[in-house]
Image (tube, rainbow, N blue to C red):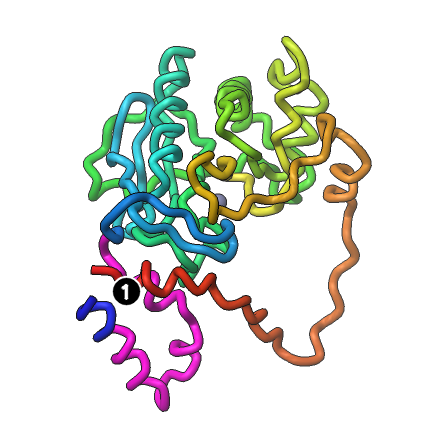
């Protein structure tokens, strides 16, 4: 308690100098080095919540290697850890090379200073598309690894030199996991899968349902688990619309857009709603 309280006091003291830092709760959430004790408890939703009693993903396991561990974002609900371990084993059984696991959640979840508008409750995990055969690297060598885009520079179609059957297979394995609620991929990737690229339609297209188009997911895909059954305070998203999602909405993501007019004034960061009240005790718990 004392350490977190001290941190908050320091932030408050810094108010006259760095007002923006004080108004950004991510400073405090990013500074807490360990999960809070006690049972796992998800509070709120992926874009506005926190996580008590988080579990840590082991840095490497069968079929996967966690990267960028200096960020301390390798925490989650135990079901998320179990999902990564299941996917690693399934990928290895399918003959796929090791995949890299990127950001999950901070030790107590909550907002992050950079990189994500979600990942706050321990049900999100980023998995990189790089499926080149790779050696087991020491943790210190995993800060800077090759994370190539799977999409052409114009962002309208996949790069077929990089995105192939292996990536399709890994996505299918992830989407087939019953705990997975949805997976975000770049719209060009979803379009290619809808077109049956890389064997995507072999054996049925039902698995495409969970794949949701979202920009920024051309080097990695983002898996979001459904709220675990024992987490009454976990806020889930509206269900994914029925069907495979290979529709006009998907195509609208890939229409060329006219360049945006120059802004009249610098864009202000959007204020975020306050975190659920119960998160304060999670942040301060010792
Ligand atoms: Zn993500």
Q: Is residue 173 left or right of residue 84?
A: right
Q: Which residues are magenta?
A: 7-34
Point 36% across, 90% down: residue: 16
Point 49% across, 36% down: residue: 225
Q: Quadrant of the N terminus?
A: bottom left
Residue 202's place in the image compared with 192, above or below, is above
Determine crowd level at label 1: few under 14, some 14-19, many 20+ residues with C-alpha closer than 10 A: some
Q: Residue furthest bottom?
A: 16
Point 32% across, 63% down: residue: 281
Q: Is residue 17 magenta?
A: yes
To which residue does mark 1 refer?
A: 284
Q: Is residue 155 left or right of residue 126?
A: right
Q: Is residue 47 magenta?
A: no
Is the stretch drawn in magenta largely helix, strand or loop? helix
Point 38% across, 11% down: residue: 93
Q: Is residue 250 left or right of residue 277?
A: right
Residue 274's place in the image compared with 257, above or below, is below
Q: For this rendering, which residue is in front, 206 or 134? A: 206
Q: Measured from the top left, where is residue 123 in percent x and y?
A: 44, 41
Q: Measured from the top left, where is residue 91 in percent x and y?
A: 40, 18
Q: Secondary structure at mark 1?
A: helix
Is residue 128 something one can see in this rendering? Answer: yes
Q: For this rendering, which residue is in front, 49 or 138? A: 49
Q: Measured from the top left, where is residue 140 in percent x and y?
A: 20, 43
Is residue 223 something one can see in this rendering? Answer: no
Quadrant assignment, res 258: bottom right
């Amino acid at each position: 308690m004392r350490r977190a309280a001290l941190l908050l006091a320091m932030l408050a003291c810094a108010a006259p100098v760095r007002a923006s830092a004080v108004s950004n709760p991510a400073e405090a959430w990013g500074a807490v080095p360990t999960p809070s004790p006690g049972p796992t408890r998800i509070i709120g939703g992926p874009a506005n919540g926190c996580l008590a009693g988080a579990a840590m993903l082991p840095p490497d396991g069968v079929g996967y290697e966690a990267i960028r561990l200096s960020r301390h974002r390798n925490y989650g609900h135990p079901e998320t850890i179990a999902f990564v371990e299941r996917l690693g084993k399934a990928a290895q059984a399918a003959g796929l090379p090791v995949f890299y696991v990127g950001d999950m959640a901070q030790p107590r979840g909550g907002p992050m200073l950079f990189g994500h508008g979600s990942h706050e409750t321990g049900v999100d995990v980023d998995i990189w598309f790089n499926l080149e055969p790779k050696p087991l690297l020491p943790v210190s060598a995993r800060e800077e690894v090759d994370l190539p885009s799977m999409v052409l520079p114009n962002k309208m179609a996949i790069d077929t030199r990089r995105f192939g059957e292996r990536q399709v297979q890994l996505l299918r394995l992830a989407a087939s996991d019953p705990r997975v609620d949805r997976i975000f991929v770049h719209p060009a990737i979803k379009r290619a899968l809808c077109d049956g690229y890389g064997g995507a339609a072999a054996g049925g297209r039902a698995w495409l349902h969970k794949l949701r188009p979202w920009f920024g997911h051309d080097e990695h895909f983002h898996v979001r688990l459904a709220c675990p059954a024992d987490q009454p305070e976990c806020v889930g998203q509206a269900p994914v619309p029925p069907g495979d999602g290979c529709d006009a909405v998907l195509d609208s993501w890939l229409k060329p857009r006219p360049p945006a007019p120059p802004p009249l004034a610098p864009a202000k960061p959007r204020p975020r709603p306050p975190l659920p009240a119960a998160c304060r005790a999670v942040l301060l718990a010792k």
